[in-house]
Image (cartoon, rainbow, N blue to C red):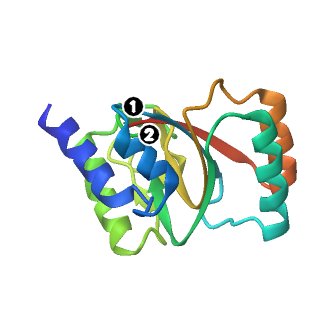
């Protein structure tokens, strides 16, 4: 239980990237709880060009008509977490659950490099992988670019995700966060 609490505290302290002027952050702080659909590129360093971001925002405003949609780009790669949905981390190579303390140690090392170096040796199978490739339950990842949709009325449909991939010229990961 202590490890889970430490993970949640770590996630909240190190990765919640909304600044105090951000409209979604303001809404979250005024509500009891919120669900945020986070869409990030599979490549942590990828940032779509401005023209494609404009097209993507128009597309998403049509899909999620009554939701606040924000685009955020940061200078450095950040951990994009699922908030309270965070449960476990599994090795992408052998499937074993990775001990939270071992994962936290790897995250600390990566954080010290501003998440420029995400590789580490798994404690389970002793192979090199990336923190970004691990299997997070619920999904999580690393990115400089993030789309946040506050309290969407539905899940993103497969066809809509495929279209968004085309618009942004990259594959997008879906993260459901709860705060």
- Image quarter where the C terminus lies is top left
Q: Secondary structure at mark 1?
A: loop
Outermost residue, top direction?
Answer: 154
In the rendered view, would you say 80 is above or below 138? below
Residue found 78% across the figure and 28% down from its top: 158
Residue found 83% across the figure and 61% down from its top: 52
Whole-percent x and y of residue 141? 51, 49
- Report the side of 149 relative to 159 (left or right): left
Residue found 37% across the figure and 32% down from its top: 33
Q: Are marks 1 and 2 in contact (CB under 8 Å)?
A: yes
User: Which quadrant of the view contains residue 152?
Assistant: top right
* Pointer 2 residue: 82
Whole-percent x and y of residue 62? 81, 38
Residue found 39% across the figure and 31% down from its top: 85
Whole-percent x and y of residue 117? 46, 69
* Pointer 1 residue: 85
In the rendered view, would you say 115 is above or below 58? below
- Residue 129 at least partly seen: no
In the rendered view, would you say 129 is above or below 36? below
Whole-percent x and y of residue 171? 75, 48
Q: Residues within 10 Å of mark 1 (few under 14, many from 20)?
A: some
Image mark for residue 37:
none
Q: Residues within 10 Å of mark 2 (few under 14, many from 20)?
A: many
- Residue 31 at least partly seen: yes
User: Which quadrant of the view contains residue 109?
Assistant: bottom left
Q: How many marks?
A: 2
- Image quarter where the N terminus lies is top left
Q: Secondary structure at mark 2?
A: loop
Give the alpha-carbon distance from disc 1 to disc 2, as whole Å: 5 Å
């Amino acid at each position: 239980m202590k490890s889970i609490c430490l993970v949640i505290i770590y996630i909240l302290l190190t990765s919640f990237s909304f600044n105090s002027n951000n409209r979604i952050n303001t809404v979250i702080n005024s509500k009891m709880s919120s669900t945020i659909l986070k869409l990030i590129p599979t490549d942590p360093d990828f940032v779509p060009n401005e023209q494609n971001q404009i097209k993507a925002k128009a597309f998403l405003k049509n899909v999620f008509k009554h939701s606040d949609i924000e685009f955020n780009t940061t200078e450095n790669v950040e951990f994009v977490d699922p908030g309270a949905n965070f449960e476990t981390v599994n090795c992408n190579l052998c499937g074993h659950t990775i001990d939270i303390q071992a994962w936290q140690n790897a995250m600390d090392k990566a954080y010290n490099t501003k998440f420029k170096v995400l590789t580490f040796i798994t404690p389970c199978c002793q192979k090199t992988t990336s923190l970004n490739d691990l299997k997070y339950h619920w999904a999580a990842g690393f990115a400089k670019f993030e789309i946040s949709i506050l309290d969407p009325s539905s899940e993103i449909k497969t066809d809509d995700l495929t279209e968004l991939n085309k618009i942004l010229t990259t594959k997008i990961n879906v993260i459901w966060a709860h705060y």
